[in-house]
Amino acid sequence: MRAAVLYSAAGSLLLTTLAAAPADSAPGGPGLPGGPGSAEFRGSVLAAARAGAAGIRFGKCAEEEELPDSVRCGTVTVPLDYAHPYGKQIKLTVSRTEATGKNPRDPEHRVERQGSLVYNPGGPGASGMFFPMIGAIPEWKRIAGAYDLVGYAPRGVARSAPLSCEDPKSFFKGPTQAPAEPSESYKRERVAEAKAYARGCAERSGDALRHYNSLNNARDLDVLRAALGEKRLTFMGASYGTYFGALYATLFPSHVRRMVFDSAVNPDPAGIWYRNNLDQSAAFESRWADFRAWVARHDDVYGLGATPEAVLRSYDRAAALLAAEPAGGKVGPGQLQGAFLQAGYYDDYWPHRANALAAYLKGDPQPLIDQAAPVTEAAVEAENGNAVYTAVECNDAPWPTSWRVWDRDNTRLARTAPFETWDNAWMNLPCAYWSAPRQTPLDVRTGPGELPPVLILAAERDAATPYAGALELRRRLSGSALVTERGAGTHGVAGGPNQCVNDYLDAYLLAGRLPGRHAECAPHAEPRPVARADRSQKEKAAQGA
């Protein structure tokens, strides 16, 4: 369930102590795993109180953060294991810009500060350290006027007690194949790789590995709330960020001020995470069809075929050619599939991917190499993100431990959804051979009046977090409201090109207003087809994003 989203200026994607809280603010309810009476609950109370007393000392960001001077950084200390709060401690890196006090619609009057808005971009394994920079974008300036914008790197990510499962120098493997109908010998190779990867995670992290999970991410969020001096949390989570945000809402409902769930993971415990990933693969087939239909409508620009079926034949022809001779010695069918999978997440990429495919089939491989080849300079970051993703999802829930179950389910699904199914299976297969203990997923649920009203945002054709997840989350969080972007499928809609969605976001975060139980927005405009010769410098730069 990999995803991380946030709109950037280029239109591409970036991507108070607990003791001081009101007396009615005991986190969670009776019988919740980690709730009152548990060692983890007592540990979270203690950790939040300590963090509230210590605060966060913000100063110049470390050079490796690559953040401008306008952003200030610090750390917050959390227990590795909340059941042993006096044991090993880890530090999470935090970034912040202070509220500007400015309203771009009324520059003569200052805006009252409403506290901190904490953001998580998803993953698992993505860092939110760049989030404070979003305040420079027009769509976010009103929010930046009222809130300190706070990002952070969750446990395991970047400099926050980083996880690793293999030597980053070995992480990018390529060129690789991507068979839609893998042979038995190919399956055996991938099973062996999954076993080796799971073993590497265990060997590199030891007993600490079990503590990288979504419940601890939710507890860390409460410690961060306290360290920021906030009695109640204002939080926005995208993609995976919605899942542990929902865990937070269940465990700490009276610590919530406002929460935005952008592109919601289905929180049904029965789906975490094996079934959710199968559902995701099925949804990507529909989004892949959306992309091919768009390319076909612009056959006069790309020449890849006037029907979705013809576009698929062009793609398959490119995959066959790359299998025989990888482009630049780096891009095989696996890299091609990875690049076009991004088009399933974000329609910003549609013109660039279509241009690259058309150029390759006309004899110019360079645009495809530029977009699909592994960026070896990012190997450390990519390996770390993949390690955190794997650890969190494997630790969070039971997974089938028999390869026969995986083989049966994915073979069946690949008959109707071949595009993403096997790639998704290989990515998650280490969880079949995971050595750390598995958790029982929390039953996300709040009753009437337990949780302040929260806002859920979703695109109807989102593949990474299928729309059914938004409906399920609304059902489970009493009093929540859902805003749907109809007929659209970009993953992550907050602060993007849809003004209707942004108006609902602003109304909620700035004034606490919700649109009732459900509201709808028309889809944002489809991307404009751009012939290669007409690309702007901005679009060329976005190709490498």
Image: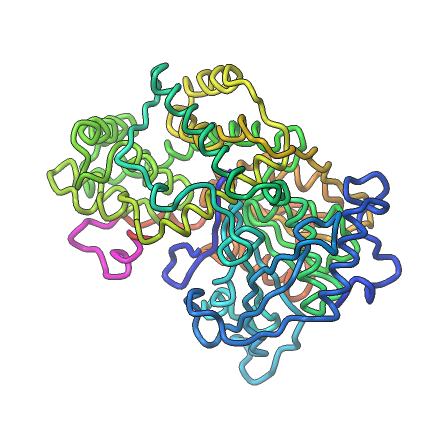
> Left or right: 304 with respect to 78?
left
Query: Residue furthest toward the right?
Result: 23
Relative to 177, does residue 33 appear above or below in the rendering?
A: below
The residue shown at (67%, 65%) is 511
- Assess whether residue 300 is covered by the magenta stretch: no
Q: Quadrant of residue 368?
A: top left
Q: Quadrant of residue 336?
A: top left
The residue shown at (46%, 43%) is 386
> Left or right: 399 with respect to 215?
left
Report the predominant secondary structure element of the magenta stretch: helix
Specify start and end residues of the magenta stretch as a single range: 530-543
> Left or right: 232 with respect to 355?
right
* Residue 142 can be seen in this image: no
The residue shown at (57%, 22%) is 401
Residue 449: percent from the left, percent from the top? Answer: 82, 50
Query: Residue furthest toward the left?
Result: 363
* Residue 118 can be seen in this image: yes
Q: Who is closer to the viewer here, 302 or 130?
A: 130
The residue shown at (31%, 55%) is 542
Residue 166: percent from the left, percent from the top? Answer: 43, 41
Q: Quadrant of residue 291?
A: top left
Q: Who is closer to the viewer here, 33 or 249?
A: 33
Q: Which color mode does the image show?
A: rainbow
Q: Who is closer to the viewer here, 531 or 238?
A: 238
Residue 80: percent from the left, percent from the top? Answer: 65, 51
Q: Who is closer to the viewer here, 342 or 312?
A: 342
Relative to 425, does residue 492 appear above or below in the rendering?
A: below
